[in-house]
Amino acid sequence: GENVEQHPSTLSVQEGDSAVIKCTYSDSASNYFPWYKQELGKGPQLIIDIRSNVGEKKDQRIAVTLNKTAKHFSLHITETQPEDSAVYFCAAGGGADGLTFGKGTHLIIQP
Amino acid sequence: EAQVTQNPRYLITVTGKKLTVTCSQNMNHEYMSWYRQDPGLGLRQIYYSMNVEVTDKGDVPEGYKVSRKEKRNFPLILESPSPNQTSLYFCASSLGREVYEQYFGPGTRLTVT
């Protein structure tokens, strides 16, 4: 089955700086790579996703890049703000096997 | 408002006392699933359902049961809870198991003493 590794487990950045979270996956058949944000006391919520026929996708301050050859994808958050503080999960999958989630990254935005 | 609801949100119980956590969605989604979230382990799938009366095991199904008698509801049953089932549980739904956004409920924090 799919195995997703996510790094780092904790990331602390100064407000206004950029944050990058990286994930690798093992199954070359995976074709869907979403990112979820989990705020304190809430369930995860999709913030951006990318499919295997696209190398990069951007939505305002967040972007995701995908390198299918190397089997890794990354989340980039620019101009970080206090409301970006949360736990972020990457996932990989597609097809009948569903999604496999990474272990999460706790992003802390320092004022 | 499109949403997934779970009840109860918090539950403290004792070893061996059967309990049910309810999950309901109002989006007419075919696919529903249960996850548990533990520190350092991320989200692990317990069971999923592709449609009414169709359920299957996820990665960590031991000690849990589910049923899907109606499209909107997907309860999680712990027949004899044990302390290692103390966790944060999430129900989720989506259009299908493949490349679709999953909508998560608010979570149920379960403590088994």
Image: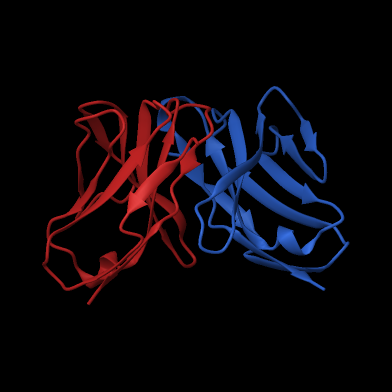
Chain colours: A blue, B red
Does any portion of residue A7 appear in the rendered image? yes
Identify the residue at the far front of this view: B1
**Residue B107 in picture, x, y percent from top left:** 41, 56
Quadrant that contains the C terminus of chain B: bottom left
- Residue at the location (24% across, 33% down)? B55
- Residue A91: quadrant of the picture: top right
Note whether A95 is above or below B16 in the view shown: above
In this view, the residue in front, A64 or B113, is: B113
Horizontally, is B56 left or right of B3 in the view?
left
Note whether B78 is above or below B72 in the view shown: below
- Residue at the location (43% across, 29% down)? B27
- Residue at the location (12% across, 60% down)? B18
- Residue B69: quadrant of the picture: top left
**Residue B61 in picture, x, y percent from top left:** 26, 49
Note whether A53 is above or below B37 in the view shown: above
- Please tell me how many numbered marks the rendered image carries: 0
Horizontally, is A34 left or right of B14 in the view?
right
In this view, the residue in front, B9 or A48, is: B9
**Residue A61 in picture, x, y percent from top left:** 82, 46
Does any portion of residue A26 appear in the rendered image? no
In this view, the residue in front, A101 or B17, is: B17
**Residue B111 in picture, x, y percent from top left:** 29, 71
Identify the residue at the far top of this view: A53
Horizontally, is B82 left or right of A18 in the view?
left
- Residue A6: quadrant of the picture: bottom right
- Residue at the location (38% across, 46% down)? B5
Horizontally, is B4 left or right of A94 in the view?
left
